[in-house]
Image (spheres, grey):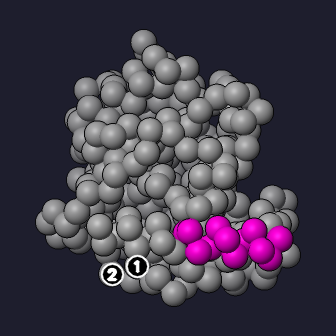
């Protein structure tokens, strides 16, 4: 097993974290990877740190985005540049367990899966352990409507089977929501929309989206993130149901109630 894995890392003003993130990739037991770091017009030394580390390892490939377009646009640019047979995502302040890629690839190959995700640890901004996020053995489209257990930092998919997948972003051809750009730019649900899209493709292919119960990553919970604002997150969840997935009011309401219940379970139990 020697598939090339392209790791996409959007980065914006993370000079205090990016080195540790890169090191968690360098320390992987699985060695056939490329790390595409897309600097989203940072105002600090993020890009310089990435460049310095790239000088010691040719697998690290920092690029500058032409303009500040947000994480979705940065991930899409990285995906366009990716050469791998698999694509994985890692945000620039998060970390991976050193066996993450090795374990995940083996699971996908053994189970003939085209998409996988894993459990992960949640740590504070300073790196202190907070809690674990568990995941089910598999999900499908209907399951994802009721709540998302997929952490973007753990997601990986098979490019050969699914093709390159792109995140919904404002002011682009794949924005068919009818929503203004200023709303889309700050909603923070682009990954969830992509997982829903992939889930529908998996149903057509008769393939599963598999979960790995072992914690293979560390999600850094920082103040000010969209995911930390539950009211705003709930509002955008409703937007996904009604404007993106085009669910009728009653089915959207049913899933929204279950989403809220699962959110409480996920974060407090």
Q: Where is the C terminus found, in terms of image quarters? A: bottom left
Residue positioned most to the bottom: 231
Nearest to viewer (mark 2 / mark 1) = 1
**Residue picked out by circle 1:** 228
Residue 242 x, y percent position in the rendering:
77, 73
- Which residue does the image show at 72% across and 36% down from the upper left? 203
Judged left or right of residue 216, residue 171 is: right
Label 2 sits on a secondary structure element that is loop
190 in magenta: no
Q: Are marks 2 and 1 in contact (CB under 8 Å)?
A: yes
Judged left or right of residue 190, residue 265 is: left
Residue 113 x, y percent position in the rendering:
55, 26
Q: Give the vertical position of 251 relative to 142 (above or below).
A: below
Q: Where is the N terminus found, in terms of image quarters? A: top left
Q: Nearer the viewer, residue 152 or 245?
A: 245
**Residue picked out by circle 2:** 223
The CA span between labels 2 and 1 is 7 Å
Residue 66 quadrant: bottom right
Q: Nearer the viewer, residue 198 or 2?
A: 198
- Which residue does the image show at 44% across and 34% down from the upper left? 34
Judged left or right of residue 53, residue 188 is: right
Task: Specify start and end residues of the magenta stretch as a single range.
Answer: 248-259
- Which residue does the image show at 62% across and 73% down from the upper left? 256
Label 2 CA crowd tier, 10 Å (few <14, some 14–19, many 20+): few
Residue 244 x, y percent position in the rendering:
77, 66
Residue 249 quadrant: bottom right
Label 1 CA crowd tier, 10 Å (few <14, some 14–19, many 20+): few
Quick check: can you spot residue 114?
Answer: yes
């Amino acid at each position: 097993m020697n598939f090339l894995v392209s790791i996409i890392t959007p980065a914006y003003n993370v000079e205090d974290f990016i080195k540790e993130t890169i090191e968690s990739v360098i320390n992987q037991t699985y060695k056939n990877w490329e790390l595409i770091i897309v600097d989203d017009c940072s105002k600090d030394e993020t890009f310089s740190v990435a460049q310095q580390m790239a000088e010691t390892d040719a697998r690290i490939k920092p690029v500058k985005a032409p303009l500040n377009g947000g994480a979705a646009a940065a991930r899409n640019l990285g995906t366009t540049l990716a050469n791998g047979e698999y694509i994985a995502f890692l945000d620039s302040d998060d970390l991976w367990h050193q066996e993450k890629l090795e374990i995940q690839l083996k699971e996908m190959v053994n189970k003939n899966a085209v998409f996988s995700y894993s459990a992960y640890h949640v740590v504070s901004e300073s790196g202190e352990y907070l809690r674990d996020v568990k995941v089910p053995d598999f999900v499908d489209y209907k399951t994802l409507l009721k709540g998302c257990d997929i952490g973007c930092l753990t997601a990986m998919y098979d490019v050969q089977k699914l093709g390159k997948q792109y995140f919904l972003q404002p002011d682009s051809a794949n924005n068919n929501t009818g929503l203004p750009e200023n709303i889309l730019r700050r909603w923070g649900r682009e990954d969830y929309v992509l997982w829903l899209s992939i889930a529908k493709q998996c149903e057509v292919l008769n393939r599963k989206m598999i979960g790995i119960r072992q914690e293979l990553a560390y999600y850094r919970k920082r103040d000010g993130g969209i995911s930390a604002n539950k009211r705003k997150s709930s509002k955008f969840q409703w937007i996904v149901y009604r404007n993106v997935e085009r669910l009728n009011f009653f089915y959207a309401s049913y899933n929204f109630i279950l989403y809220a219940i699962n959110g409480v379970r996920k974060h407090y139990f």
